[in-house]
Image: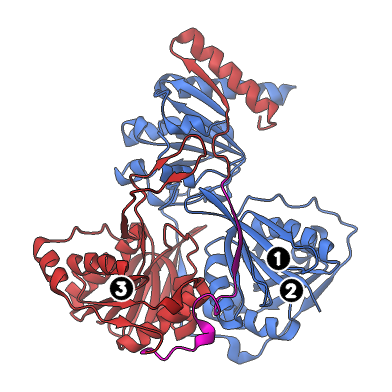
Chain colours: A red, B blue
Amino acid sequence: MNIAIPIKQVPETSNVKMDPETGTMIRDGVGTVVNPLDLYAIEVGIRLKERFGGRITVLSMGPRMALSAIREALAMGCDDGILVSDRKFAGSDTWATSYTLAQAIRKAGNFDLVLCGERATDGDTGQVGPGIAAWMDLPLATYVSRIDEIDAKSLIVERLVEEGYQKLRLPIPALLTVVKEIAAPRLPTLGGKKRAKLAEIPTFTAENMQLDESCIGLNGSPTRVVKIQHPKVAREGVIVRAADDESIDAAIENLVEFLRGKKIL
Amino acid sequence: MSFVWTIAEQRDGRLKNVSFELLSRGRRLADTLGTSLASIVMGSGIEQSELERLIQQGADEVYYVNDRRLADFVCESYSNIMVFLLKQYHPHSVLAAATSLGRTLMPHVAVRAKAGLTADCTELDIEAETDNLLQTRPAIGGNIMATIKSPYHRPQMATVRPKSSRPLPADPTRIGKIIEVSVPEELFDSRVSVIGYRRDDESFVNIEEAEIVVAGGRGLRKGDNFKLLRDLAEGLGAAVGASRDAVDRGWIEYPRQIGLSGKTISPKLYVAAGISGSIQHLAGIKTAETIVSINNDPEAPIHRIADFGIVGDLFEIIPRLTKRLGRERKGSKTA
């Protein structure tokens, strides 16, 4: 079973501090990681490979820096990496990104499955996975939390939806976006890290993929960012201390009064 | 023609609440543009009286595609039909809810229609003179608000965060048209089939749709202590959520996780108990209308974004609060 996994390099947010004055993220000195939600896709890919054989190709669209994200995925157990990188890709929105990645996957080979994280933790749109499925005309299942059955021709999955879990049957090839519940990602091994360090990672460019220039980068992107605002996060609410019986009762009375004022009670 | 469209969602022939939230958004945009508002319904065997609710709550027209094969959401067929309708009617903009359906269908359609799409918007407006749709959304974990437009492409598409707007009150005197649309047979894609649904527990609730959410974190110390929150939630008519910490420890199931790797919610009231408020957690609750925090650490970041914070022991406070709210309810019944 051959699997393609597009991944994104994102700012590391787990150690990020907030500026208490402005309520914005302090991004100085913040490192980059593989989008945490992509790790679930990588883990599922590796488990399927362990069961069925085949190869896993990870692709990442971004600057050269994204090579470190690709190497991290290789260290976990993916086989091949491809950097999708070109200055012409700058300013791509989700429309142009899904076009570019779909073409890169096509050029990379024939795959039984394309696995994506549900969304990236920086852009937070979740639009690229379904977008790639549309470009490649692949049957799509989003928010996949479990693969119930799978063979060479089809699979049955559960997807997490508002009412619970929806069970779908899809033919192979297909594209899945997966959620955290599907599998706990493994850590890279020492051997994996060594292999990843030495791996040759080719670069796909607009030219060698023969992309339609009207579909890439800022020019190929229908959306434009008009403005960015930093909302004030702190609400400057009431803070009360409740240390003993009396102050707990007082705090609860105050809270009830407060909720009445908000017409919640 | 230049309509505003909303995509209505249904399940078992009943329209979901988000369908009406979208209409209040759409109504305002359509009025600003001086155009009409249409709601697109794909489903099977939906009663006329149910469709009329869309008219009563803001739609001028309802386009209903009625087919057994559309009873459940299957992206490929829904997308084919949307692309077909877009080519026929050329709407100015299309709004869908940022639900599992909207966030799957809309990017699929946007690619095929070469339309700009903005995810999970919390504000929508019309740019004077150009009529561009100004779409504002929280990004980078809610730390910035980005306003986005698609100046050269139509339709302009957006998914809208559930609960970020309230439905309009029903007006039974509103007049509109319900049009049943038949679509070509080849638009039904049979590659993917829905086998069914599974719900592990009877109490499965979607925390994104709840008016009030009560959530617990590491401060609860063990999974059994979620009972305290369940009791409180029952009194408030709330859904129970959790921080990532609580989910990772196996205290509660993942669909209830709130934050960057879980769900983003905008309830009327959010109560956080024993949650310190990591940046990832705060990203999921920033658009809540009112936030109440209960945490014994006065320095916990959750207190900074709370409208009402209690610094104290949740094990003392929550049971008493539950009891007190019980009295409140009895009081309001006799009043």
Identify the residue at horizontal 61%, vertical 22% (top origin). A256
Number of residues whose C-alpha sits closer than 10 Å to that of mark 1, classed few (under 14), some (14–19) or many (20 or more): many
Q: Front-most of B158 and A151?
A: B158
Identify the residue at horizontal 80%, vertical 67% (top origin). B129
Residue designated by label 1: B133
Q: Are marks 1 and 3 on the same chain?
A: no
Tell me the amino acid under the disc marked 1.
Answer: Leu
Q: Residue furthest left?
A: A191
Chain holding disc 1: B
Tell me the amino acid under the disc marked 3.
Answer: Glu
Query: Which dot, 3 or 2, sits closer to the camera?
Result: 2
Query: Which dot, 1 or 3, sits closer to the camera?
Result: 1
| Above or below, B19 relative to A104 | above
Labelled pair 3, 2 in contact (Cβ < 8 Å) = no
Q: Earlier in the sequence, mark 1 or mark 2?
A: 2
Task: Give, as a single range, the part of the protein colored magenta.
Answer: A208-230
